[in-house]
Amino acid sequence: MNWAFTSSGNVTETYAVGLLRKMLEIPSSSYQERALADYLAEVLTDLGFQAHIDGVGNVIGVIERGAGPTLMLLGHMDTVSGHLPVRSEDGRLYGRGAVDAKGPLAAMICAAAGAVDFPGRIVVIGVVEEETPRSRGAMAIRATHQRPDALIIGEPSGWSSVVLGYKGKLDLRYTVKCPATHPSNPVPKASELAVACWDALVELLGPDASHGVFDQPGATLCRLNADLTTATADLSVRIPPGFDVDELVRELRDRLPAGSLDVLNSVAACRVGRADPAVRALVCGIRQLHARPRLVVKTATSDMNTLAEVWDIPMATYGPGDSTLDHADDEHIVLSDYLRGIDVLTIAISELAHLPVRADDRVSDAPLRVRSLR
């Protein structure tokens, strides 16, 4: 028996904690994920996966255990920039990515490695560039992989919560140039036009727009670089299901007297139902650990949006970690929650072994909560 596994075939707690700590010790900010990908390729190989790194830098591990369903577990390797010293203290493990999202990815690796009775194919993927506007890693996966029978996205939901959906996102850039003139000249200046663009966007979205409400859009002025002659404004709109992006862009352009408005990125909102087989499988795992599952939707965006645009399959987002610590200077994960997350995923994998999953109807009575962060 490999020392990484218990006598029952599960990954040991010592190995699981050591894996996550090593992942945190390898910096992997967006566009700099290769060192972590190389390490995870070795880890996956040692754990029995067929592992490789694809053309965009995603690390992919596959275990074939029969002719049953294909389950994909996908998390992201990249983090926001900023080094945090890795340390353990009071049952917590600190480090950049502990929550977002190396903790969920490590939990997926451990659960998949221990799923010795799964009768089909398990694919574990660590993607690149989730923290960037383009989500190049997930885009490559959906373009090159056959859709699986079920998908779990690794993001911090909290070990006893399951994410049903995310708002979409529309990224815009407004640029304008004006002739040089004196500040007292009454003609519009580039800086004023950029501010007017922002004001027009806010007015178009309406008084109910909010980042705290899933069913309403919410806008952010991400960057403004402006003077009298040139201006660039980056605008981001988080959008609910069914939002008409084309109409918003058309109406905003109609209100701009000068300059150009470009769409940098657009991804639709996504949301699955409470009875989705992937949701039910995760809920089953949480209940078996004697907790009451919480079903939530989030007002941010994840790779679930990217994959849901083309894959109409059972899917949900899950992972240990407190999402309010995403990108925080004290980012950390409670190790007991991390280990519970592995257990929940292990049970969920077993539940998904014979799709469609059938669980009791109590899931439909679970409360739905809205989270403002990932």
Image (cartoon, grey):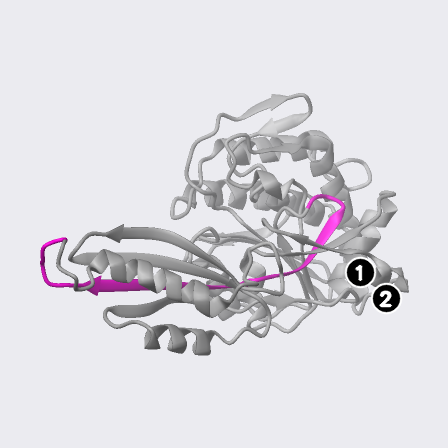
**Residue placed at 79% from the left, 67% from the top?**
275
Q: Is residue 188 above or below residue 323?
A: below
Indicate the amino acid at tag 2: Arg
**SS category of the residue bearing label 1:** helix
Report x, y in % for residue 44: 59, 45
Farthest residue in the top direction? 89
Q: Which residue is label 2 attached to?
A: 358
> Over which residues does the magenta segment extend?
158-183
**SS category of the residue bearing label 2:** loop
Indicate the amino acid at tag 1: Arg
Residue 355 belongs to magenta span: no
Report x, y in % for residue 70: 68, 65
Main secondary structure of the magenta stretch: strand
Q: Is residue 140 visible?
A: yes
**Contact between labelled residues 2 and 1, with CB atoms less than 8 Å apart:** yes
Residue 168 belongs to magenta span: yes
